[in-house]
Image: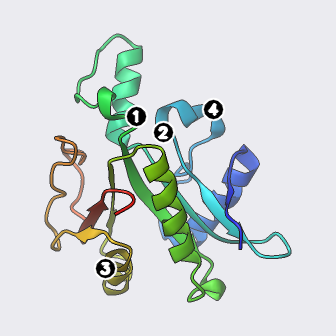
Amino acid sequence: MTIELAETNSERAELQALFSHVFEGISDDAVPRVEHDDLYAPLLPLIRDAEGSLLAAAMSCRTELASAAIMASRIGRGDPFGVIGLLDKHSELDLVAVQPSARGRGYGSRLIQWLDSELEHRGVRAWFGNVTVNLETDRLREFYRRHGFEIVPDFQPLPPLLGKSWMKRDAQMPQFYFYKRPGN
């Protein structure tokens, strides 16, 4: 089982289709197009079967807050959130999806392990994400704990990481947040 990266817009469209199939109500543009990589710095690992069909994929990237700060700085508004200096020091695990017929075979774990290693190699110091109430929260809480993430108690805010709050002010509180330093 090898990990590939979605580096073209057509590959990313496949990921978008998988995420849309697995997650109800996901935005049609959840996966950034190649031309926006400078904003989001996405890591998009995927696993295919022997016939080339997509089995599993993940997306870890800069937060929306960081992307907004980049856009603000480009139009002369400086760094309104004070995060520009941390762009390559954080990553948000936004999505992990496995085809329902392929679950329970270790694909999700393999993607998390690959991302953890790659983020550590890139010098990322804070990796985090959240699980919303409409997902299998008990199973996912144990999955992330098994992979070394600290689990924040239900409906509690993500603690400051790298000295910053990464939550949007108007964001709805998820079931739980999780975080870790890659490689730990």
Callout in the foreground (4, 3):
3
Disc 4 from disc 3: Cα separation: 34 Å
For mark 1, what is the residue?
67
Query: Which residue type does callout 2 highlight?
Result: Tyr
Mark toward the start of the polypeptide (4 vs 3): 4
**Going 15% across and 55% down the picture, which residue do you hit?**
159
Query: Which residue type does callout 1 highlight?
Result: Ser
Of 148 and 62, nearer the camera is: 148
SS type, badge 3 = helix
Query: Which residue type does callout 4 highlight?
Result: Glu
Mark toward the start of the polypeptide (3 vs 1): 1
**Going 25% across and 46% down the picture, which residue do you hit?**
166
For mark 4, what is the residue?
35
Callout 4: 10 Å neighbours few (<14), some, many (20+)?
A: few
SS type, badge 4 = helix
Disc 3 from disc 1: Cα separation: 27 Å
| Residue lying farthest to the top in this orientation | 76
Residue 137 image offset from top left, x and y in percent: 32, 81
- Which quadrant holds residue 87? top left
Figure check: 56 above or below 90 = below
Query: Which residue type does callout 3 highlight?
Result: Arg
For mark 2, what is the residue?
40
For mark 3, what is the residue?
141
Disc 2 from disc 3: Cα separation: 26 Å
SS type, badge 1 = helix
Q: Is residue 163 left or right of residue 110?
A: left
